[in-house]
Amino acid sequence: MDQERKRRWIQSQQQRLDDIRSRRLTPTHHLKIDNIRLSKTEKIIQMKQPTIFRQQQSMAIDEYISKGDCKLIFLQQQNEDIGFKTFSEMMRTNSSWWGKADQLNPNESTLKNRLQFNQFQANRFTNQLTRKWTSTVNEVTELLNKQQEMQQLQKVKKIKLKPKPIPQVEEDEQHYDDTNKQFDPTSTSIKVFWFNIQINEWKPPVREGCSVTYVPSLNKAFMYGGIGNDLFKNVIALNTQTWIWRDIGVGKGEAPLEGRFGHTATLYKQSIIIYGGEKKFNNLMKRRECYSDVRMFNPAEKTWTQLKTNGDIIEGRRNHIAQCVGKYFIIFGGLNPYGLVLNDACALNLENNKWTVLHIENQFLEGVSDAASAALFNGEVKMENPYFSYECNKKKGKCPTVNQEGIYIFGGKTQNGEATNDLRVIQFGFKPIRIVKLKTKGQVPIARYSHSLNYFYHLNALILYGGRNDSKEENILNDLYVLQLMQMNWVLVQQIGGLKNGKFNHCSVSIDSKILIFGGYTKNVYANADIQLIELDQYKVSKMIKENKNNNQLSINSSDLLTNTNLKVFKTEFYQENTDQERNETKKQYDTMRSSQVNLKSFMPLPSKSSSQLMQDYKLLRLKSKFSSPNIFQSI
């Protein structure tokens, strides 16, 4: 064995010597050795790899490129910060991408990782571009908006406004606020001043039993219904800045088909709720039927909506009282179609349109009709249920200050036809609810019905005017009382320039420091269609008394309304344009009405003789009327 080993060792050494000799002889021996080493290393790597990688050999780089998986280029050499290049760009710049690819490890996972990294960098680059683009677009739009705003500001500066005595008005308003603060609401020396606005243009026909609701956001009062020479169903708007009436028609949507009177109109969230009222006389039934539907009128859009109510069945009625308390619409009393006086109180939830007959503590309380009411709470009411306690949130608005919150009701007519002067209040937050008669002091007004009751903030008082008492010789009343709410004291007010005759069944609404009164009945005739205003502010009243030394009723022509300092109200340019447009429209209506009267023909029979002097005069006037002004024909 030892000899055999020696022999093998000698052979190996000889072979090495031969190899050394061959290296010296051949110049390409380095290449052969390198190839042998590469083959050996490849075999070693294949032996070390697991069986899975032996079976699934890694794909070549050119196959990745041909398939399109290599969407982006590879990074350049490690020390070069060249960035991204496509394969076509690399070919143009004579940079061999094959050589770059050969430097990479031909492992499939490493190639995929590099591709993902390249995609991440590409997305990052595109996001930066989009951010720069959006920022530049936003800057350009901001510059354009600023330029437009500057152009608009320049246009506003070019407007030439008419000079107005603004400092004097500001002084008057400041003095007005100071005097209201200095005025003692407990004082019993209260005076009011009456205005009579004579309207030369179109005005609504005379009527009674109508309703007027003031919408402060629109600076307009809306009148609906009433009865005169007909049962009216049109809605009429009064602009309280120009005191111009405008007939806006029946309205859109679910408008009532017929007119009504003796109904109620209540403001709720910029809409007017119309409930109840009386229909035309039914000759077959020999009675007047009453409405029981609930309709809402949107004055801004001039549209009607009829509420589909559910819950308890409520009897139709007229000459009742109605007020909104939170989300509830409350009604009390009134007359049914058979002339019976009702004593029930009902509540309509305006969110789910459900009627509920409220339980009253004194079920045998005598009901009233033709009464007047006002809802007085120490703030904005939030009521979830009439029987539960409610929240009263005070706000900056003109809210009353009362000891007992609720719906105040004064006067009315009982079942036996007698008038009453009881002051009641419907109180909520109890089950059953309470209707309490309040005790008052001072000069208590006499019993009455079909009167008006309004609240005035600066005096914190209720204003009672007019009405009727059939037991008195002068059954139509013309007195005016103030109820001071904190003291519950009645004061008879001195009226400067008051009406000669009283009114009843009229409509009234409080507008700032004035009370507007329209329509009604007086001394066997309907009251004229002029507007009566009662000024309650004590500073303005004293100022007007000094100006009007005779203490007569102040009559103002409709053409002088805008220049009158006592009726001057601050007007924006928007309202100025609207009021001018309304004045032009009403003027056109009035002109067409006057011209239509000229074209009327007389139906009176003429004398049979053609030679009579009357016939000749008539023909001459007819010929002159074709070439002369319309006023000539009025002499016929």
Image (tube, rainbow, N blue to C red):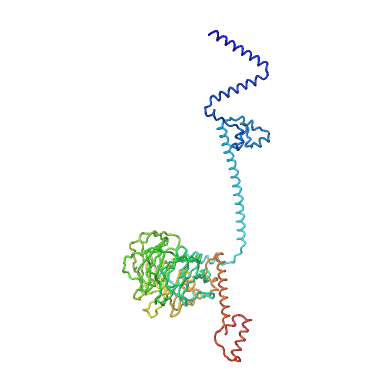
Q: Is residue 497 left or right of residue 636?
A: left
Comparing 189 with 585, the one in front is 585
Query: Measured from the top left, where is residue 341 in percent x and y?
Result: 36, 72
> 534 or 204, which is in the foreground?
204
- Give how far across and how far down residue 605 sits, in percent: 55, 87
**Residue furthest toward the top?**
3
Judge by depth and name the residue closer to the eye, 11 or 91: 11
Q: Quadrant of residue 394?
A: bottom left
Residue 366 pos. (x, y %): 33, 71
Please report the residue visible at 57 percent of the width from the left and 23 percent of the height from the top. Answer: 43
Q: Quadrant of the C terminus?
A: bottom right
Residue located 64% across and 14% down the image: 20
Q: How many marks?
A: 0
Residue found farthest to the front: 55
User: In this view of the protein, can residue 538 be seen by the observer?
Assistant: no
Tell me: residue 143, above or below residue 341: above
Looking at this view, is 481 or 551 the one in front?
A: 481
Query: Is residue 501 something that shows in the picture?
Result: yes
Q: Is residue 221 left or right of residue 615?
A: left
Residue 633 vs 222, above or below: the answer is below
* Residue 180 image position (x, y, % from top left): 45, 66
Q: Is residue 161 above or below residue 529?
A: above
Where, by quadrant of the figure, is residue 56 drawn? Answer: top right
Horizontal side of residue 537 vs 67, given as left or right: left
